[in-house]
Image: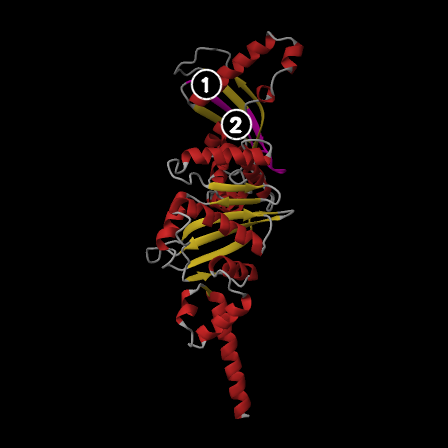
Amino acid sequence: MDKLKKLQKNNLQKKSSSKNKTPQTVDDLNPEERKRNLEWTLILDSYIENSNDYCVFLYERHHFTNRTAINNTNKFFMSADAHCKFKLCTCRLHAILYENSRLKINYFGKIVHEIGEVHARPMRGSRREELQKFTMLGATPAALYLQQLKLMSTANKEAGNRNVVGSSRSVIRKISSEGNVKLRRDDDLEKSLRQLKSEQTEKLFPGEQIPGYLQEISIDPLRLICFTAGGIAAYHKFASTIPLSWDATGGIIVNRKKRIFYYELTMSSLDKGGSSLPIAVMLSASHGTMDIIHWMNCFIEKYKQVYGYTNPFPKPPVIHSDRALVFLLAGIQVFNGDETMDRYIERCWRIIQRVATKRDLEINSCSFVSWSFYEKRQSFIWHVVDGITC
C-alpha cells in the first residue's frame, strides 16, 4: 500500500507540473520522466493471482483519488478494470482499493481457455529488476528460466498462464542482456573494463602487492586475464605437491557470432569430496597455444613480483587436461622448459614401460597423454598375441 501511495503522490505531482510547463519545456523532459509508471499493475497482479490464477489480465483503465491526504480509512483510493487476454475467455474484473488497504474485486464472465494457447503479462519495473539481480550474480538465462518454471502453480500450467516465466524464453534472455548492459561502466568496452579493473583494485586485496582480480586487458584480440593475490598464495603453497588441471570451454560466456573461450587453471580440493579451487582464469576470443602461454606467463610474472625473481616457479607433479593439443604444447613449454615434443613422447613411453629415470619423474607430465600411450601399448600387445596364436 505504501508503494501505491507513493505512486499516487508522484502522479499528482507530475500532473500539476505538466500544467505549468509550456509545450516546448514538456518536450525537453528526459525519457524517464515521460514514461508512465506502471508499478501499480505489478502490485495488483500479486493480489489478483490469489483469487484467479488462471487468467492473464490486460488493464483497460485505472483511476487514483485526487486527495493529497491519505489516511487509514475506508475511503476510495484507486480502481482498475481489466479483461482476460485469452481469445475465448470472457472473464473481466473491476478492482477497488481503499485507503485502509482493503481490496475488493468483482469478476464477470466465464473462464474458457483453449488447450495450447499461452499468454503472459509484460515483465516491467521491479519485477524486471528482480530477475536481473539473479543474472548479475551469474545465473544463466536458461537456469533462471527453469527456476521460474518451478514457481508456476498447477493452475498456471493448466490454463496457459505464463506470467511467472514470460511468454517465451526470449523474454528472460532479453532481461538478462539488459542486466549485463547495466554492469558496463562506459559504452566503450575498453574504458568500461579499465574502470572495472580500477574498482576491483580498490576493493579486492587492496593491501597486497597484486591487488584486484582483473589483471590484464587486451581488446584486439580480446583477452582478459584474471586472478587474485589469494590464488598466487595458494599456488605457491600447494602447486608443487598437488595435481592441477586446466581446461577451456567455448560457449559458457557467449556463443553467437564469435565464441569467447573460458580458460581455468584449478587445484584439487584440500578437503576430500570438496570442490576444486580456481587459481587463474582467462577469457579469450582465440584458442591457441600462444594464448595459453601468454596467460601463464602473466601469472608467472605476478608470482615473481610477490615471491622474488630468484626463486623458481613451482611446477605441479601432474597437470590434467583433455585431449586438446594446445594444452599439451603449452604445458611442455611453460612447465618443462626446453623439452621438445619428441623428448616428451620418449619420456612418457619410458614412464608407462616402468623404466623411467629419476629425472623423468621430476618433470611435469600430462595425464591424458600417458593414458593414451598406455591404451595404444595394450592394443599393440594384444595384436601381437593374436598374431602368434593364429
In-image side of 278 versus 93 (left or right) = left
Distance, label 2 to label 1, CA atoms, is 14 Å
Residue 92 colored in magenta in the image: yes
Q: Position of residue 303 (x, y in %)?
A: 42, 47
Residue 357 colored in magenta in the image: no
- Quarter of the view holding residue 357: bottom left
Identify the residue at image location x=43%, y=18%. 99
Q: Say which element carries label 1.
A: helix
Q: Position of residue 12 (x, y in %)?
A: 52, 13
- Quarter of the view holding residue 314: bottom left
Q: Is residue 323 visible?
A: yes
* Residue furthest out toward the top: 20
Query: Which residues, given as a range, are shown in magenta?
Result: 81-99
Q: Amino acid at mark 1?
A: Lys
Q: Residues within 10 Å of mark 1 (few under 14, many from 20)?
A: some
In-image side of 377 versus 306 (left or right) = right
Q: Say which element carries label 2.
A: helix
Q: Position of residue 169 (x, y in %)?
A: 57, 44
For the N terminus, the image quarter is: top left
Q: Position of residue 33 (x, y in %)?
A: 58, 19
Q: State the mark number for residue 5.
A: 1
Give the labeled residue for mark 2: 41
Instruction: Identify the coloring.
Output: secondary structure
Q: Amino acid at mark 2?
A: Thr
* Residue furthest out toward the front: 310
Identify the residue at image location x=37%, y=48%. 233
Question: Is label 2 in contact with label 1 (beta carbons under 8 Å)?
Answer: no
Instruction: State whether residue 176 is above or below residue 313.
Output: above
Earlier in the chain: of badge 2 and badge 1, it is 1
Q: Residues within 10 Å of mark 2 (few under 14, many from 20)?
A: some
